[in-house]
Amino acid sequence: MKIFFLEKNRRCVTSYLSFLLVLCVSLLSVVALYSCGSSDSAPSDNTTIVITPKSGMDLYGFIGDTEGKPIEGVIVTDGFTCTQTDNKGIYQMKKNNKTTFVYYTAPADYKASAATFYQKISTSKERYDFKLNKLSGSETNFNLICIGDPQVTSNSEVTRFKDETMSDIKKFVDASSKPVYGLCMGDMVGDKPDLQTQMKTIVSSTSMPVFTTIGNHDKVAGTVTSEPRNSNVFCSTFGPLNYSFNRGDVHFVCLDDVAYSNSTTYDGGFSDDQVEWLKQDLSYVSKSKMIILYYHIPLRNTTSIVNRNNILELLKGFSEVHLMCGHTHYSENCAVTTPISTYEHIHAAACGAWWHSVINGDGTPNGYAVYEVSGNKITNWYYKSVNFDKSFQIRLHKGNSSFGGTYGYFTYGQKENSIIANIWNADENWTVNVYEDGINKGYMTKATSITTDAWSEGYHIGVVGRDPDNYNQPAKHLYIYQMSNPSAKIKIEAIDRFGNKYVQDQIVNDLTTAGAY
């Protein structure tokens, strides 16, 4: 009997040790499996997910949520080809030999992160997994902030961007009752690639996810002047150049439209590969969505930009389309008429006239644009000047005023009884009423014969002594009115396309507020 119990106990111990051995081997297999993917984005439920790619498919992976459950229908791309995850959360494709990243389009019901939606491709592996975080609720209503060219060239300018622009944006984000997303319109730096990392840290310093496009000053010249500039430093900092993401009923698309022909000469344009990529990307998007396409160099209604029409043709049929860009260091809402009818929002620069003042070359204050999104429409937009309330949308001057200093003076060249209003976010759908001593006297009209802002030129060229060829940007939002009573108290009431009213009754006669806040 004693021998029987000893033998029984020995068999139990042996079985238990065998069970532990099998368990350890299984755990090691799971660890080994996930080591083939990204360690910070692998599923977390310890489920062994085996992927057997089809013949010729050398780029594949698994996309799941934080519990390891597969997510179906996620668009994945290498920047040339787009595909979707299947019902097991698996994607696979033939990798393009020019690709450097694999990345996904954030679905509307999952968090969008500018830092984790991509992985750099390594020659040593083919599998890349991603883990997505589910949103707690719908984001069909949100605020969008668009930042034009920071274009920093020194640590002092980085500090100004942080303390002025981003400090103002942080206040907006903290006060918002809705989610806030940010787009940067390129030229994060002014030919100073070593500042890119600092700028990424700064734009990421609020709770607002910020997605960035590349500008001409973000590209770096090589050692051979005949070769086009490259985007290597920018990509190592910010990731892919052409990508998309979804928020609510909006599909965002970023494209690089800066085409260098050598180390110094560039123009706006898109490659055939970009046209094909966008065609594939949009094929997965419902026509009921709004498309926001953003890039650096304005497209306007010009025909000189390579593949402009081919890109815009792909946007036909969607519920609403808006184009977002920067580059010019002046503000303009441009009505694009062909091959689609839409608005191109050309954003003034965060750096203004290259950090020599607190204004752009057209008199627009340093700042950023705010768009309120509801469903598949933009229901309101306005320009937010740094260190000013959002109601500050107008600056008034006498039409015969002269502004300047040591290096010259500038004037609007108008009669003594005329008033000039600089309304930096205006377009053809604004109405500008004039009151003299409280009595409505009619409307201001566009000052089509005045092409530049004398107040801005007076400071940048006349006082600071900057190059006139670079500091006389077009001012496309000047309005004029001839007063019937030159001694009357003037008040301007501008009403935008959404019915918002902006009032100004102070006439600016000097340059005090041009140089500093």
Image (spheres, grey):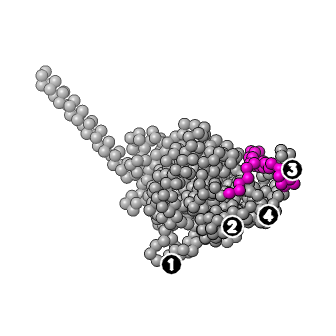
Whether 206 is drawn above or below 349: the answer is above
Label 1–label 3 contact, CB within 8 A: no
| Membership of 488 in magenta stretch | yes
Residue indicated by mark 4: 414
Q: Mark 2 or 1 closer to N-term?
A: 1
Q: Which residues are magenta?
A: 483-510
Q: Is residue 261 visible?
A: yes
Residue indicated by mark 1: 226
Observer-nearest of 507 and 346: 507
**What type is the residue that disc 3 sits on?**
Lys
Magenta stretch, main secondary structure, is: loop
Q: Counting other residues with Cα less than 10 Å from the Cα at mark 2, is it few (<14), some (14-19), or many (20 or more)?
A: some
Residue indicated by mark 2: 409
The residue at the far top in this view is 1
Residue 5 picture quarter: top left
Q: CA distance from mark 2 to mark 1?
A: 41 Å
Task: Determine whether, in the image, residue 37 is placed left or right of residue 289.
Answer: left
Question: Please, what secondary structure does the residue beneath circle 3 have?
Answer: strand
Percent x, y of residue 189: 51, 61
Residue indicated by mark 3: 441
Observer-nearest of 181 and 147: 147
Query: Looking at the image, is mark 1 or mark 4 nearer the viewer?
Result: 4
Q: CA distance from mark 1 to mark 3?
A: 60 Å
Label 2–label 1 contact, CB within 8 A: no
Q: Counting other residues with Cα less than 10 Å from the Cα at mark 1, is it few (<14), some (14-19), or many (20 or more)?
A: few
The residue at the far left in this view is 2
